[in-house]
Amino acid sequence: MRQFTVSAVAALAVLGAALLWAAPAEATGCRDWDRASPARKTALVENMIRSAISGNRGREYQVNRGQIERCLQRSAQNIGYDFDDACADGRTAGMQALNNIFKHYVWSCVR
C-alpha cells in the first residue's frame, strides 16, 4: 500500500508539472487550434507531450517517464480528436480546456 501511495504522489507531481510545462511551450486555444493544419495539430500535440516529459522538474520524481511518454504518444491522435471536439460547433474553448483534456490523458498514463 505504501508503494502505491508514493507512486500516486509522484504521479500527481508529474501531472502538475506536465501542465505547467505544456502550457508555455504550446499555448493554444480553440481559435489557434482550428486554424492549424493537420500537420501543425500533430506537431502541437507532440510538443505538449515532449514538454510534459522532458522538463527539469519531471526528472525529480521516481516515475517511468519513458512509459508515460510512450502511452501519451499512443494517445496523440485521440488527444487531437478530443481537442477538435472541444473546439467544435464554434465554441471558443480556451487554453485551459485543452490543458484539461491533456491532463486527462496524462492521468490515464500514470495510473
Image: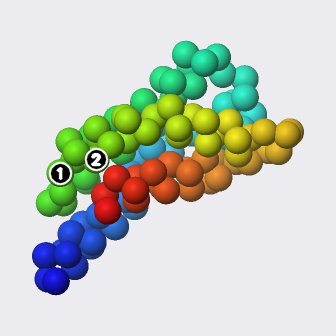
Query: Which disc number belongs to residue 68?
Result: 2
| Mark 1 nearby-residue class (10 Å; few <14, some 14–19, many ≥20) | few
Question: On screen, 30 above or below 42?
Answer: below
- SS at mark 2 in the image: helix
Asked whether 6 or 4 is in front, the reply is 4
**Residue drawn 42% across the image and 30% down it:** 46
The disc labelled 1 sits on which kind of residue? Asn
The disc labelled 2 sits on which kind of residue? Ile
Q: Quadrant of the C terminus?
A: bottom left
Q: Position of residue 61 (x, y in %)?
A: 18, 60
Question: On screen, 37 above or below 67?
Answer: above
Question: On screen, 5 above or below 79?
Answer: below
Identify residue for label 1.
64
Q: Position of residue 19 (x, y in %)?
A: 45, 53
| Residue 53 in sight from this viewpoint | no
**Residue drawn 27% across the image and 73% down it:** 9
Image quadrant in which you'd find residue 6: bottom left
Residue placed furthest toward the right: 90
Is residue 71 shown left or right of residue 105?
Answer: left
**Residue drawn 56% across the image and 19% down it:** 40
- SS at mark 1 in the image: loop
Asked whether 48 or 76 is in front, the reply is 76
Q: Position of residue 42 (x, y in %)?
A: 51, 24
| Residue 54 in sight from this viewpoint | yes
Colour scheme in use: rainbow
**Residue drawn 21% across the image and 69% down it:** 7
**Labelled pair 1, 2 in contact (Cβ < 8 Å):** yes
Question: On screen, 40 above or below 73?
Answer: above
Is residue 51 shown left or right of residue 79?
Answer: left
| Mark 2 nearby-residue class (10 Å; few <14, some 14–19, many ≥20) | many
